[in-house]
Amino acid sequence: MQSPDPPTPLHVQQIVKTYQQGTAKVFALDGVDQKVEPGEFVAIMGASGSGKSTLLHAMAGLIDVDEGRVKLAGQDLSQLSDAALTRFRRDNLGIVFQAYNLIPSLTAEDNIRLPAPKRMAAKLDSIVEELLDRLDMTARRHHKPGALSGGEQQRIAIARALVCNPTILLADEPTGSLDSISGTQICELLRNLVDQQGHSIVMVTHEPHVAMWADRICVLKDGTNLAELRTDGCRNPQSVAHQYQQALGGEVAV
């Protein structure tokens, strides 16, 4: 018997999120649609205030939306209680932050272990070993975050996000606190997680040289889908910047 197709990792359907600003209602998201297929790497690109971070938080179920649906691994997040959502997020979602969010008093290895539930105890050692090896961090496993470089801390943060083998990985400006060399290494790592491990990733960024590592780029402006750009495997930041400026309708940067 043929095994069933895996559920769509993430499907955002016509979501709306508003905030009250004095007497005015501000649309942070205004009818956004986004669907992420298994093994797909999607970048969300936009200027400050475009809604990209709000979209990522909605995808993660960290904020409620006013209208529309967010479906993660086929589950409508709005149908879950707070406790059930917490458990579901732990099992199906990995989040990587710009600021790493590692626990300073714990070693790199213990930071990776942190999200794992008790039911994983029997196989956790082998999972952690594999992640440390895959991310080339075995030699740094006993170091605390303060003794690690920014790139090393982000690798540990990525390993922590992967420890429960999530359906999808969300990355919020993952290279924003890194130098250009470390940033490129993290981009290459994320690309390899898709190409070699089959992970699905959504990454928020405003940098063309980061967005170019994705399969496609969703451009947001004023909380709405403005354009979809294809990279076609071409790692060309100038091409991405050109397409991005064209999508925005502005002058093309030289």
Image (cartoon, rainbow, N blue to C red):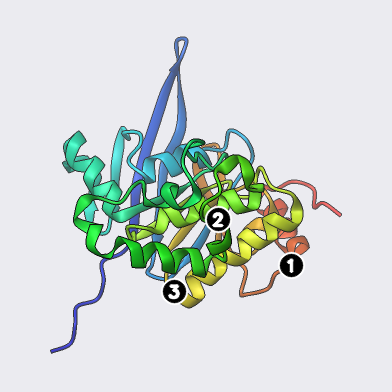
The residue at 18%/87% (across/down) is: 2
Q: Relative to 74, is 105 on the left or the right? A: right
What amino acid is at disc 2?
Arg
Q: Which mark's residue is nearer the viewer, 1 or 3?
A: 3
Q: Residue at x 61, y 53 (%)?
A: 152
Disc 2 element? helix
Please tell me which of labels 1 and 3 falls first in the chain: 3
Q: Quadrant of residue 200?
A: bottom left
Frontmost residue, 146 versus 94: 146
- Is label 3 in a helix, a strand or a loop? helix
- In the image, is residue 114 above or below residue 66? below
Q: CA distance from mark 2 to mark 3?
A: 16 Å
Q: Amino acid at mark 3?
A: Gln
At which x and y percent is residue 126?
A: 35, 68
Does the image show residue 22? yes
Q: Which residue is mark 2?
A: 155
- The residue under label 3 is 197
Q: Which mark is residue 236?
A: 1
- Decide which of tag 1 and tag 2 comes sooner along the chain: 2
Q: Quadrant of residue 11?
A: bottom left
State how far apart marks 1 and 3 are (Cα): 24 Å
